[in-house]
Image: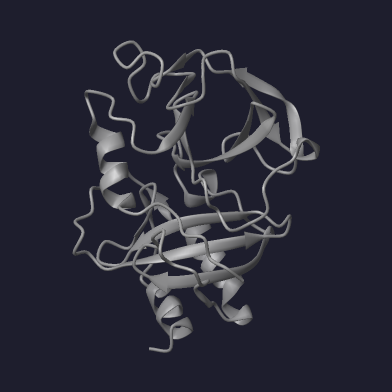
């Protein structure tokens, strides 16, 4: 299956988003109730349709793209590119603290949580228990030039990987230098959609500040043949 690539330079983008006083909009994001959600335009899973939409959840109140000074990153009900007035819905089968969907120009856009300051465990950010069909892993972050999927994690290890992430403790997300070893995990969910997230090996941190036991790295290395 063709791998269309995610966002190149993800680490720098998220560091800029997390700490940008001037509201630098680098990734497509929305923020509601203190939770920050991001969207990758080229997630390899199936796109959402209107059939996936749950009840209306909120409305975008300001857009960085429309008002950079008045709508910096992190403002509640703010968005990077969606215009003010855009309706945001729950996603069927998922909690709103994990996934939201926006409708704009007759398209449905999926946003997935990456930072939640109230979360204590990984399960409160990544609510994927019993929803993961398979996991792909690769070293480094995918780029627009990548065309292949990562290496499948062994079916016997998928549940263990999910459980390690669920039980991880949450801290404020750390900046990660480009030289820090990292893995990119793509979670293929049972509804055909995907969740792509980075795991930083030296600090045992999943994107979003979820600190997981070192056992995760061993399982990923085993999948990669090390």
Furthest residue to the right? 51
Rendered position, 66 above or below 203? above
For the rendered model, the colour scheme is one colour
Q: Residue at x 52, y 45 (%)?
A: 41
Furthest residue to the bottom? 225
In the rendered image, the quadrant that contains the N terminus is: bottom right
Decide if residue 37 is in sight here.
yes
Image coordinates of residue 17 in percent, x first then y, are 30, 35
Image coordinates of residue 190 in percent, x first then y, are 72, 59
Image coordinates of residue 157 in percent, x first then y, are 57, 77
Image coordinates of residue 221 in percent, x first then y, are 40, 81
Decide if residue 172 is in sight here.
no
Rendered position, 208 above or below 88? below
Q: Quadrant of residue 188?
A: bottom right
Front one among 210 and 17:
17
Q: Quadrant of residue 211?
A: bottom left
In the rendered image, the quadrant that contains the C terminus is: bottom left
Front one among 38 and 160:
38
Q: Residue at x 33, y 45 (%)?
A: 171
Rendered position, 21 above or below 6? above
The number of numbered discs placed on residues in the rendered structure image is 0
Relative horizontal placement of residue 25, taking residue 216 as reference (left or right): left
Relative horizontal placement of residue 171, taking residue 220 as reference (left or right): left
Relative horizontal placement of residue 175, taking residue 184 as reference (left or right): left
């Amino acid at each position: 299956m063709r791998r269309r690539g995610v966002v190149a330079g993800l680490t720098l983008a998220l560091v800029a988003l997390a700490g940008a006083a001037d509201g630098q909009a680098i990734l497509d994001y929305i923020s509601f109730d203190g939770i920050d959600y991001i969207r990758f335009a080229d997630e390899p899973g199936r796109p959402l349709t209107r059939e996936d939409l749950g009840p209306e959840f909120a409305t975008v109140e300001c857009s960085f793209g429309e008002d950079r000074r008045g709508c910096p990153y992190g403002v509640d009900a703010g968005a990077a590119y969606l215009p003010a007035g855009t309706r945001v819905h729950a996603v069927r089968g998922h909690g709103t603290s994990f996934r939201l969907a926006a409708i704009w120009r007759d398209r449905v856009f999926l946003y997935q949580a990456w930072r939640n300051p109230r979360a204590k465990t990984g399960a409160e950010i990544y609510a994927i228990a019993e929803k993961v069909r398979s996991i792909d892993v690769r070293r480094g972050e995918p780029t627009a030039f990548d065309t292949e999927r990562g290496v499948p994690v062994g079916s016997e290890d998928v549940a263990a990987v999910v459980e390690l992430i669920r039980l991880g403790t949450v801290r404020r997300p750390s900046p990660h230098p480009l030289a820090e070893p990292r893995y990119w995990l793509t979670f293929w969910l049972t509804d055909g959609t995907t969740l792509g997230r980075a795991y930083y090996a030296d600090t045992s941190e999943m994107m979003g500040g979820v600190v997981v036991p070192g056992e995760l790295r061993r399982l990923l290395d085993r999948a990669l043949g090390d």
